[in-house]
Amino acid sequence: MDALPPPRIDLLVHSPAPQPYVPVLSLLLEPSPPLKHLLAPQLHAYIAALPAGDKPRSYADLVDLCAQLLAQWDVEDQADFLAAHPRIGETKNLSQASAGEQGPKNGQQGTPGEVLKRLQVLNALYEDAFPGLRFITFVNGRSRAEIVPEIESLLDLSIPPPSPSTPEPRLSDLRAKLRVSPAGSAAWRAELHRGIDAMWAIAKDRAGKMGV
C-alpha cells in the first residue's frame, strides 16, 4: 500500500505544534529519536518565528532549514541522526523510500548474494574504522554492486572477488589492515560531514518525488 502524500508545504509550515513535522521528516530522512525529539521541535519553533514571507515554500527549502539546524548540534547527536539510515545492502525492515532506492531499477535483476555478503563485510569494517558512524551514500540509481568500490576506496581497501584460488578473506585479517579514525578526530568528522551531505542529497531527491 502506497504511503499517503505529505501535506502541502504552506499548510505544514503553519502547524500550531511540531507533531505534523514528524511523519514528513521521517519520509525525507528516515525516522529516529533525534528526528522526533530534536529536529521536529527545533524546526517548528524556527519556522513559527519566521515572517510569513520567509517561511519555506517547498520541501527542498525545508531540507535546507534542517541542514542549518543540524549543523548546530553536537557531533554525537549528528552521528545518531545519521545512523537512522539503513545500511547499504540491508534487505529487511526498510522504509518504502529506502527499499525503492536500494532495489532493482528498470529491469535489473535482484542483488546477487555475493554482493550482499560483500556489503555486509564492508559495512562492518566501515563501522570499525569510523566508530559510531554508518556508511551513507546517495545511490542515485546505482546498483548495490556499484557501491562496493566506493566503500572500499573510503576504507583504502581493495578486496579481490572470491574465487577457487582467492577465497573470501577473513574479516579479522581485513580488520588488521584498517586505519581507524577515533570518534571526534578530524578524519572522523570529515566522514560524518560527508555522510550528512549524502543524507541531504537523498532527502532532496525524495522531496522531488513527493509530488507536492
Image: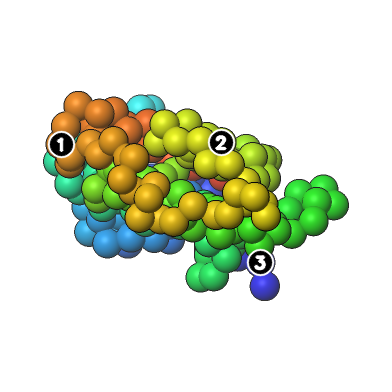
Q: Which mark is residue 149?
A: 2
| Outermost residue toward the front in this view | 165
Q: Position of residue 8 (x, y in %)?
A: 53, 48
Image point 20% across, 27% down: which residue?
Answer: 186
Q: Is residue 181 above or below residue 90?
A: above
Q: Is residue 62 above or below residue 12?
A: above
Q: CA distance from mark 1 to mark 2?
A: 26 Å
| Outermost residue toward the right in this view | 107
Q: What residue is disc 3 on? A: 2
Image point 67% across, 55% down: which residue?
Answer: 164
Task: Report whether residue 113 is seen.
Answer: yes
Q: SS class of the residue under badge 3?
A: loop
Q: Would you say the residues marked 1 and 3 are in contact, meaning their CB atoms lie under 8 Å apart?
A: no
Image point 31% across, 45% down: which residue?
Answer: 176
Q: Which mark is residue 184?
A: 1
Front-lying residue, 10 or 80: 80
Quick one: quadrant of the N terminus? bottom right
Q: Position of residue 67 (x, y in %)?
A: 33, 34
Q: CA distance from mark 3 to mark 2?
A: 33 Å
- Which tag, 3 or 2, sits closer to the chain's start? 3
Residue 154 location, quadrant: top left
- Which tag, 1 or 2, sits closer to the chain's start? 2
Identify which amino acid the numbered label 1 is placed on: Gly
Q: Is residue 113 above or below residue 184?
A: below
Q: Which mark is residue 175?
A: none
Q: SS class of the residue under badge 2?
A: helix
Identify which amino acid the numbered label 3 is placed on: Asp
Image point 29% across, 49% down: which residue?
Answer: 128
Count the marks. Answer: 3
Front-lying residue, 164 or 20: 164
Q: Is residue 110 above or below residue 195?
A: below
Q: Position of residue 71 (x, y in %)?
A: 24, 33
